[in-house]
Amino acid sequence: MRYWGNRIELTENEHGQVIEENNFIEYDGAVYYLKYLNNDIKGSKGGNSSVFILYTKEADNKEKVIKISNYFRPHRHTPEHIRRRFGRFINEIKVLNDLKEKEKTNIIEIYFNGEIEIEGRIFPYYVMEKADTDLKEYMLAKKDVDSQEKVKFCINVFDAVKELHIEGYYHRDIKPDNIFLFYEDGDEKEKLVWKIGDLGLVADRDKDYDDLGEKIGPFGWLSPEAMNKYLTEKAGLGFDCKIDEKSDIFQLGKLFWFIFQGNVPIGQIRFDDFICQVEHKEILFELINEMLHYSKPRRISADGLEPFVVDLKLAFAV
């Protein structure tokens, strides 16, 4: 491996092939090798980390995923904003281990974590289970997902986010790419299992790893307060810039809209904008509309969503 352009890259030969013996980690007496998630696109998503597939040469090998911080262990001259990003990665590992210990099965499972030396620098990493696909790819590939199944997705993700909030965490990066899907035993015909992943922006109520005016999350999925932070926080104009549990609710509303309609709502929504063909459209729109209020005091809370979720379950016999 090498550290290049503030990212971790795998070393290759002159033919562009990954050199197996140069790209590995050792953990608990075992050797694990790294390869790209996609050989055609030799990059990895994630602004603060690099992600690869991890495998062994054992007969019962099951591929895993390794996530390596793009920021090495700080020294005394390291700028504060780099320290914050390094701290955010360490916090992600802590949160994942905490949720695993509490047996939160709807969160991507972490297997182990450690540190690796690359070009004299120390980088933290963790290893997690490998999903079959994510919600975005699944919804775009399968045009025949029925309304009942879509409602199940919405309810399951809502329950997972609520569990995070109960434990004192905010995800802050809820989008289809971060909802991972598994097939039991790897068989597509078996029961579908979903889990929330990519906790790289997860926030603890008692800690702050954000820079002043930092963009927290991707455009298109930002809550109003996340956009305020990015655009106005440095100017001190007094707008709400606190990204908390209601910010997750806003992103969750956008996710629900995407599940049913296939696009992302931008701006205030109207019933006429909700053009998908679905039963009980009025119930769904009222729920999503309550989640997408720009004013945080007007935006519904997780507790306030419970009656709507009950109505959904009854309406769609979930």
Image (cartoon, rainbow, N blue to C red):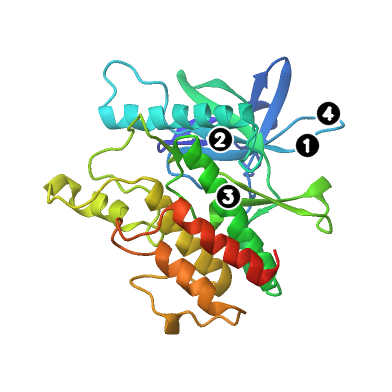
Q: Amino acid at mark 2?
A: Lys
Counting from the top left corner in percent of width and height, residue 62 is at: 78, 36
The amino acid type found where label 4 is placed reads: Glu
State the SS at label 4: loop
Which quadrant of the figure has residue 141?
Answer: bottom right
- Which of pointers 2 and 3 indicates the residue nearer the eye? 3
Pointer 2 residue = 67
Instruction: Look at discs 4 and 2 and give the one toward the viewer.
Output: 2
Classify mark 1: helix, strand or loop: loop
User: Which of label 3 and label 1 is nearer to you?
Assistant: 3
Amino acid on which disc 3 is placed: Asp
Classed neighbour count for the residue bearing mark 2: other residues with Cα under 10 Å, few (<14), some (14–19), many (≥20): many
Residue 304 position in % (x across, y down): 45, 56
Q: Is 41 placed above or below 128 here?
A: below
Q: Residues within 10 Å of mark 3 (few under 14, many from 20)?
A: some
Q: Which residue is mark 3?
A: 159
Q: Earlier in the sequence, mark 2 or mark 3?
A: 2
Residue 259 position (above or below residue 273): above
Q: CA distance from mark 4 to mark 2?
A: 21 Å
Side of 171 relative to 314 (left or right): left
Distance between mark 1 and mark 4 Cα atoms: 9 Å
For the N terminus, the image quarter is top right
Residue 43 in sight here: no
Residue mark closest to the camera, 3 vs 4: 3
**Alpha-carbon neighbours of circle 4 within 10 Å: few (<14), some, or many (≥20)?**
few
Q: Point out which mark residue 58 bears.
A: 4
Residue annotated with mark 1: 62
User: Residue at 62% across / 40% down in the picture?
Assistant: 108
